[in-house]
Image (tube, helix red, strand yellow):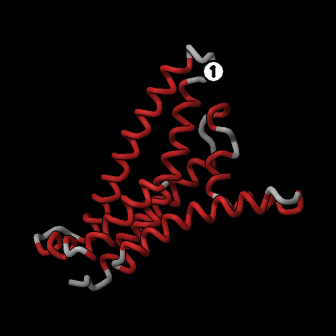
Amino acid sequence: MIATTAWGASAIGGAEENGRLELDLAHGIGRVSYVLENALAILLKLVVFGIVIGVVVGILNGPAELGLEASGIIAAIAALAGLGALSATAALLAGAITGRRIAGVAAGAGIAVYGYALQAVANQSGDLAWVERLSPYSWAYSESPLESGFGWGIAAVWAVAIVFTGAAALALRSRDIAG
């Protein structure tokens, strides 16, 4: 989450603060394509990260006698990458709205804090168990992707990340850029 938050915060908010965004846009790059290409670059980093994790877990699966199915490993990587994408796109959106890197860091970190806080509150009492369903971490892992494979929660995390990306494109398209 730390890396993806930094990537998302730097993509637009950081680029605007250091003057690179204005320079890039002056060279005929569209605002919407700028956001989408930055989101795609972050996604590519997540895919590479996921492949490395998958290969390592796959190699260790036999000797460690974990008994994991390939589909479960892929689903768990999709859950982890989805949570990373959620933090990254929240940071991307905040940077597009404000033009500030720190706002992106706060938004990306806020996703993590929000998720962990909801999990902690839900674990305090059986009466508060419903609060856990509001956490993106619960969405991604409630169905245990290593055992069950893909579930609705993984799709929900990725769907919110896609919505955040679209909102970032709209926000940057309709805002003046600080120079």
As drawn, the residue found furthest toward the left would be: 27
Secondary structure under badge 1?
loop
Residue 121 point in image, percent of width and height: 77, 63
At a point 36% along the width and 72% down the height, the residue shown is 101
At a point 72% along the width and 57% down the height, the residue shown is 119
Residue 115 point in image, percent of width and height: 64, 60
User: Is 39 left or right of 150, judged from the image as shown?
Assistant: left
Residue 143 point in image, percent of width and height: 69, 42
User: Is 26 left or right of 168, judged from the image as shown?
Assistant: left
User: Is 78 left or right of 104, judged from the image as shown?
Assistant: right
Give the camera-side residue of 82 and 123: 123
Figure check: 82 above or below 164:
above
Three-letter amino acid code of the residue under disc 1: Leu
At a point 54% along the width and 25% down the height, the residue shown is 70
User: Is 103 left or right of 27, judged from the image as shown?
Assistant: right
Circle 1 Cα neighbour tier, 10 Å, few/some/many (<14 / 14–19 / ≥20):
few
At a point 67% along the width and 39% down the height, the residue shown is 144
Residue 174 point in image, percent of width and height: 32, 82
Give the camera-side residue of 58 and 63: 63
Residue at label 1?
A: 66
The quadrant where residue 127 appears: bottom right
